Amino acid sequence: MITEEIYKDEREIIKVIAVLCANQATGILKNNQVIFNVKFKEIKSDQIFFSQVESNNKNYNLAYFKMTNMDAEVTLGGNIYLFSAIPMSEKSISTPSEIRSHPKRKYPRIKVSGNPLISKMYTNISMKVVDPNIQDEELSKKIHLIINTIESNLMRSENYDLAKITLFDGTEKSILVKILKKYKKPFVVFDTNNFKIKDEMVLTYEDYIKQASEEGINIKDIMAQLDKIKEFYIKNKIRSEALVPLIFEDEVIGQIRVASLSGPIAKANVLRLNNLSIKAVEDLFVKCSFELSSKEPQILIDLSVGGARVIITEETMYKYIRLLKRIYMQIVFPDETVLKTMATIVNIYDDTPEGYKVIGVKFSSNMDWKDKQKLEEFINSVLRLENKELLA
């Protein structure tokens, strides 16, 4: 999964540039068809200096583009760094105000929108959704009825004292939800009198502590939060608890939470809950899901064999756009042939000036080999044409 980091703090930016300089990293600066290959040397007086600058067009040097925005792309190790570069001299640019970083991509990527070599290429998008707050009264009732039935069954037939199903909407911030989504495994407190009981098939508060630490939370604050959780269990006489993810098409769409006041949860209970969660997903998505489809062509910003960046103009989809959401794509080529594939949202970028959503998607690894071959041939043909123009 491509995960983007954004550096806006001046100290962080200087630290990144210093690393690039220390490693004499190489990169490119682009302005339309003019490309400069550069090697980083040092940073001083708010400027980045290069030891080497080579242009693909001998009619231009870097100073020609003085005070003009250029796109910079630098690769170091397994990461790519992107920022806006403003030339200050023949061998220097100003220090950027923002740097974006993501793992190096596996496949070459071509610009689609605004590319003079590509005419009329776009994508249509659809997604399956279960929304208990949907305005459709009949469908909303059906969703709530299924949820209430499952909760009631968990309490009456499975003997839990508390049972609650929650469908996620992408606004969840809790660490427990984050680790459910990350590992796609149940979170279990087998016995609230002993948080140290573990099993490889489940997540525990040990995973909670690890996630909180990775997010930079002070260990003292983490332990204070655990003390509050223990107090909550004691106050409400909870002896055991489990949160089981609801997984649809490899996306965690919600959770089943159960708790017992009478005793610990056994491993067999967790296996049973896993089976019930699969049944719950089947009931919800077979009987209550609806499909949203884009009414107008959606804009392809760029494209590779592995994925794409897309501008979503369909506002009805906005509330359902979240990381790891599965979508269905129809990519329409200039010759009007259509490639159909599933994709996963792996990045959500800043909105466009018009307020449209921008997403990065990764194509399914199960894409038909003929479709993948067509996509690869198309991308390579565009790259060849671009190289011809550069050499002309």
Image (cartoon, grey):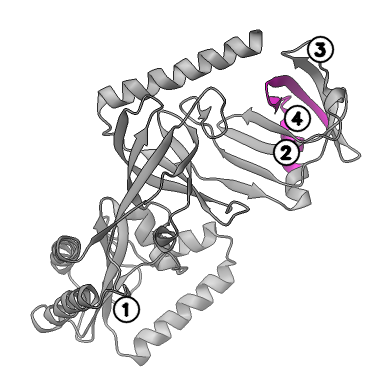
Q: Secondary structure at mark 4?
A: helix
Residue type highlighted by circle 2: Ser
| N-term mark: 1 or 2 | 2
Front position in the image: 138 or 181 = 138
Alpha carbon of mark 3 to alpha carbon of mark 4: how far?
31 Å
Alpha carbon of mark 3 to alpha carbon of mark 1: how far?
73 Å
Which numbered mark, 3 or 2, is in the foreground of this view?
3
Residue type highlighted by circle 1: Thr
Callout 4 environment at 10 Å: few (<14), some (14 to 19), or many (20+)? few
In this orientation, does residue 243 appear?
no
Image point (53%, 32%), residue name = 104
Is 240 above or below relative to 87? below
Q: Position of residue 212 (x, y in %)?
A: 50, 63
| N-term mark: 4 or 2 | 4
| N-term mark: 3 or 4 | 4
**Numbered tag placed on residue 192 in the rendering:** 1
Residue range of the region highlighted in magenta in the rendering = 15-42
Front position in the image: 270 or 123 = 123
Image point (28%, 76%), residue name = 241
Is 124 above or below relative to 382? below
Which numbered mark, 4 or 2, is in the foreground of this view?
2
Which numbered mark, 3 or 4, is in the foreground of this view?
3
Query: Would residue 272 be counted in the magenta stretch?
Result: no
**Numbered tag placed on residue 84 in the rendering:** 2
Residue receiving disc 3 = 59
Q: Are marks 1 and 2 in contact (CB under 8 Å)?
A: no
